[in-house]
Structure formats: structure tokens, C-alpha cells
Image: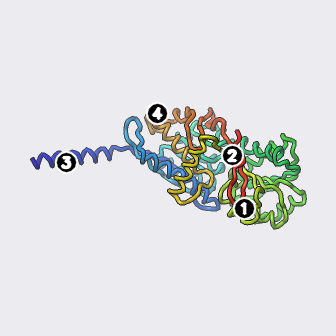
């Protein structure tokens, strides 16, 4: 009897082991700048992906009736296009099933060619330059509105709501900064506004006194900056030291919880107006609130900007695999492209024929007492 029981026990153990060995591992790649000036944003993104993977694994995912284990494979692109393409190739060589990233347009755009050639779906949670989805790659998607919408909305807002009479523009010459600044300028002109100057800097600059002094002579009442918070913070400090009391506007790159720390006491209440791609209203706000609470509990950090979009991108990608009954990129890609009405924490997600999100929302913010203060959600 004991011998029989032992055989049964070993059979059960062997069965469990074979099932564990048979469990499919699905690799989801993530790329963002986890080093460099905007590492806080890159880490925010990576944590959004990590939370999605952990929750999906805890819940259990089955593809074609088989339990799978999701594995996060991370790379650092430092916000640099060359490092971005190297990171993309590493993920391709690692045979990931899909990629969420990159954060910047300047890294996402060149990397998209590599993913396209490998046939690996890529969803960016934050690349807003229109060119990202205009290259005809079937593998390229994004879950945020692009710069045409973002810059255009801010340009109209600067003229019609802020009532700017003399508007100056500065951009950091990156794909993101230049793109959003150009769309802002177009919208200002279309709305009948007056542009008094356009100056240029870089995403690594720290001294803006020369360009700010040039703009001060033109007495702007609105200064728009196309770039990221790591540059915007010091720029606000130097504007204050020069006595430039203009409204400061920008896109999602400056619209972070970190901006107030980077600007210090140079940022007056209500001075900054920025827009973040995405936005939820009404009943959908609870989903976002629940996400931010879970994120805070897991990482002991507040959401910066893009973590919820990364979280949604991972979930949308896995949902497509489940619907297609396959994690093979070639097989689930058509299902991903047909994503329609997916209910994410950032709102409903439907892709158009280019891979852009349909009817993407924008949320306008200002800052009070160092905290972001929502103005409105617009579409």
C-alpha cells in the first residue's frame, strides 16, 4: 500500500513539474530613460509596466486555454536616439513578444523601424510627435493623443482663454519639443494670436539667460516651452531672476509632479498651464484613482505622468494576445490593431488605421501650492 501511495505521490509531483515546465513564458519589453536628466519619468514608466505585469500574473492569464507567465524585460535608452535603437535591437534579439515604449518621440521613432522589420508590435505610452505613426509601420501604436492635438489645444487656449497678446516660444530641438512647439505656433496664428519670438535650446542645457534676455525685450505675456521638466524647472528660476512674469505653458513633458520641485519658489500659483495627453471624467475617474493608490502602495511614489498609459498599454497588448489565442506577434498583431473600446484606467482605447488612439483626450492643468491642479478635460 505504501509503495502504491508513493507512486501516486511521485506521479502527482511529476505531473505538476511537467505542467510548470510547459507553462509558456511571454516576454513584454519595456524601454525608457531610467538614467539621465529625466530618469524619474523613465522609472515612472517602468513601474507602470511592472505593476501591470504583476497584477496580470497574480490574476492568471490564459492564452489558447494554457496558463502563461508574463515576464518584463527592461532596457534603458537614456532618452538618446542611438541608445534607443541599440536597446530596441537587444529586445528583438531577446525575442520579446511585444514592446511598450519608448518614452520620448526622439527614441520611439527610430526604434519603430527596428520593431517593424522584426514584426514585433510596439505601443508607445507617451511619444506624441505625429511622425511616430506616419511611417506606415503596421506594428506601431500609441495610447496618447499626438502633438497636433496637444500643441493645437494649448495654442488656442493661450489666445482664447489666457488672452495672451504677445506670445514667445522656446523649444529644445528634440523630436518632441520641436514638434509640439510647431503645432502650438500654428494654432496661435490660426486663432489670431501674435508671436513675438522663437528661441532654441537643448534638452541638456542649464543656462537660458541669453535667450530669456532676448525674449524679455519683447515683453511676452506668455512663454511656451517645448521640452521636458528637467529643463523647464531651471528655466522658470531664471525667468524669475530676470523679472519675466509671463504665463509659462508647455505640453506633457513639463506637466509632471516633479516640476514644482525643479522650479522651487520661482513658480507662482497659476503661472504654469500645461496639458497631458489623456484624461478621464465622471465614473472613469474612480479607475484612475484606484490605480494611483495601488501604484503608491506598491512603489511608495506618486505617479509622475505616463505610468497609467504604460499600464494600459501592457494590458491592451496582453488582451490582444488572449483574443487572438496566441502570443506570436504575427498572430496577435491583427487583433491588437482591431482594439476597440478597451476600458483602461486612462479611458477607452480604440486604435485607428495608423495605430493612433481615436478621440484622444487631453487634460489641462495648472499648479497651486506646488501641486498639479486640473483645469479641464478636452477632446
Q: Residue at x 59, y 57 (%)?
A: 302
Residue assigned mark 2:
363
Which one is in front in this view, the residue at disc 4 or the one at disc 1?
Answer: 1
Instruction: Give the CA distance from mark 3 to mark 2.
Output: 59 Å
For disc 4, the neighbor class at 10 Å (few under 14, some 14 to 19, many from 20) is: some
Where is residue 73? Give x, y as percent. Answer: 48, 52
Label 2 vs 4, first from the N-terminus: 4
Which one is in front in this view, the residue at disc 2 or the one at disc 4?
Answer: 2
For disc 3, the neighbor class at 10 Å (few under 14, some 14 to 19, many from 20) is: few
Residue assigned mark 4:
324
Instruction: Give the CA distance from mark 1 to mark 2.
Output: 21 Å
Label 4 close to label 1 by CB (< 8 Å): no
Residue assigned mark 1:
233
Which one is in front in this view, the residue at disc 3 or the one at disc 2?
Answer: 2
Where is residue 7? Give x, y as percent. Answer: 16, 46
Residue assigned mark 3:
9
**Residue 1 appears in the figure:** yes
Q: Residue at x 60, y 40 (%)?
A: 283
Instruction: Give the CA distance from mark 3 to mark 4.
Output: 37 Å
Q: Quadrant of residue 124?
A: top right
Label 3 vs 1, first from the N-terminus: 3
Where is residue 318? Give x, y as percent. Answer: 48, 41
Where is residue 53? Give x, y as percent. Answer: 47, 48
Q: Residue at x 56, y 48 (%)?
A: 310
Amino acid at each position: 500500500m505504501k509503495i502504491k501511495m508513493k507512486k501516486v505521490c511521485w506521479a502527482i509531483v511529476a505531473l505538476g513539474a511537467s505542467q510548470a515546465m510547459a507553462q509558456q513564458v511571454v516576454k513584454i519589453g519595456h524601454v525608457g530613460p531610467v538614467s539621465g536628466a529625466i530618469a524619474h519619468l523613465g522609472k515612472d514608466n517602468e513601474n507602470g509596466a511592472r505593476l501591470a505585469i504583476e497584477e496580470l500574473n497574480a490574476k492568471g492569464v490564459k492564452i489558447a486555454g494554457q496558463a502563461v507567465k508574463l515576464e518584463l524585460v527592461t532596457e534603458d535608452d537614456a532618452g538618446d536616439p542611438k541608445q534607443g535603437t541599440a536597446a530596441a535591437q537587444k529586445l528583438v534579439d531577446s525575442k520579446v513578444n511585444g514592446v511598450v515604449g519608448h518614452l520620448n518621440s526622439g527614441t520611439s521613432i527610430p526604434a519603430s523601424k527596428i520593431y517593424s522589420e522584426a514584426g514585433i508590435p510596439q505601443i508607445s505610452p507617451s511619444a506624441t510627435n505625429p511622425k511616430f505613426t506616419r511611417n506606415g509601420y503596421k506594428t506601431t501604436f500609441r495610447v496618447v493623443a499626438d502633438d497636433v492635438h496637444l500643441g493645437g489645444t494649448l495654442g488656442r487656449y493661450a489666445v482664447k482663454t489666457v488672452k495672451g497678446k504677445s506670445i514667445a516660444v522656446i523649444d529644445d530641438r528634440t523630436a518632441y519639443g520641436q514638434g509640439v512647439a510647431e503645432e502650438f505656433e500654428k494654432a496661435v496664428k490660426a486663432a489670431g494670436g501674435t508671436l513675438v519670438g522663437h528661441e532654441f535650446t537643448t534638452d541638456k542645457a542649464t543656462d537660458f539667460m541669453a535667450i530669456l534676455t532676448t525674449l524679455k525685450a519683447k515683453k511676452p505675456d506668455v512663454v511656451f516651452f517645448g521640452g521636458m521638466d528637467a529643463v523647464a524647472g531651471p528655466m522658470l528660476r531664471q525667468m524669475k531672476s530676470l523679472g519675466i512674469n509671463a504665463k509659462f505653458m508647455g505640453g506633457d513633458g513639463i506637466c509632471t509632479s516633479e516640476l514644482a520641485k525643479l522650479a522651487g519658489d520661482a513658480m507662482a500659483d497659476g503661472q504654469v498651464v500645461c496639458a497631458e495627453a489623456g484624461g478621464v471624467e465622471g465614473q472613469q475617474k474612480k479607475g484612475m484613482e484606484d490605480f494611483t493608490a495601488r501604484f503608491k502602495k506598491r512603489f511608495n511614489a506618486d505617479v509622475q505622468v505616463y505610468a497609467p498609459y504604460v499600464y494600459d498599454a501592457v494590458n491592451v497588448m496582453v488582451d490582444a494576445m488572449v483574443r487572438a489565442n496566441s502570443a506570436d506577434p504575427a498572430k496577435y498583431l491583427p487583433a491588437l490593431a482591431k482594439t476597440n473600446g478597451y476600458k483602461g484606467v486612462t479611458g477607452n482605447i480604440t486604435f485607428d488605421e495608423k495605430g493612433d488612439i481615436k478621440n484622444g483626450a487631453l487634460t489641462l492643468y495648472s499648479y497651486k501650492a506646488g501641486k498639479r491642479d486640473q483645469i479641464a478635460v478636452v477632446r
